[in-house]
Amino acid sequence: MRRVTVFFYGLFMSEELLKRRGLNPTNRRMTEVENFEIHVGKRASLLPKIGSSVWGIAFDLSAEEVTALYSEPAVADYRPEAVLARSARGEVFAALCYNTDPSNDSIADQAYLEKLIEIATNEELPPAYLVLLSRLRN
């Protein structure tokens, strides 16, 4: 079965959430993707920004699992982009990153943001990144 490495930066960082959806994520890696910043509206998206970085979790999933996950109506407008990722251990690898255009989504959904901060904390993302997420609160 072909596996695809996907970098998750929103609620899908949660291995438990992915498993509840019937997926089998493997090869979990805390990961940084440089030259992007996170934008939180109704959901999370990434914006290009030189010098910034976004932390998340990379997992390997089957191609079928990825297709099923991103066919759900709430995330159907997300499109795959190739990114160069670096694990917390220094491993550099290519990954898919699903992203959407945030241009019509300027107001942060506070409930989504709180859940994102909770998951990022549980996943033990770097403290400086948790502070950055906390600053997005209204």
Image (cartoon, rainbow, N blue to C red):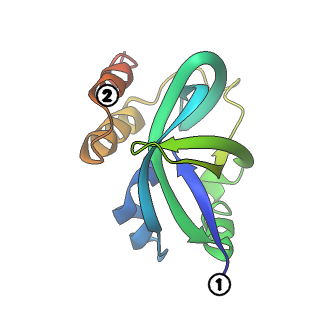
Q: At 37% from the left edge and 15% from the top edge, which residue is drawn?
A: 138
Q: At 47% from the left edge and 69% from the top edge, which residue is drawn?
A: 25
Tell me residue 66's x, y (percent): 63, 66
Query: Does residue 129 lie above or below 71 as drawn?
Result: above
Q: At 45% from the left edge and 65% from the top edge, which residue is drawn?
A: 27
Which of the numbered marks, if any, corresponds to residue 1?
Answer: 1
Label 1 near label 2: C-beta < 8 Å? no
Tell me residue 57's x, y (percent): 45, 49
- Horizontal side of residue 136 vs 97, given as left or right: left
Q: At 37% from the left edge and 20% from the top edge, which residue is drawn?
A: 132
Query: Does residue 128 lie above or below 112 as drawn?
Result: above
**Residue underneath mark 2:** 130
- Asked whether residue 10 is in view, the answer is no
Which of the numbered marks, if any, corresponds to residue 85?
Answer: none
- Horizontal side of residue 48 vs 32, given as left or right: right
Q: Nearer the viewer, residue 8 or 39?
A: 8
Q: Nearer the viewer, residue 2 or 101?
A: 2
**Image depth: mark 2 or mark 1 in front:** 1
- Asked whether residue 7 is in view, the answer is yes
Tell me residue 134's x, y (percent): 32, 22
Tell me residue 36's x, y (percent): 60, 26
Q: Secondary structure at mark 1?
A: loop
For marks 2 and 1 on the same chain, the one whose residue lies earlier in the sequence: 1
Type of amino acid under label 2: Leu
The 10 Å Cα crowd at callout 1, few under 14, some 14 to 19, many 20 or more, is few
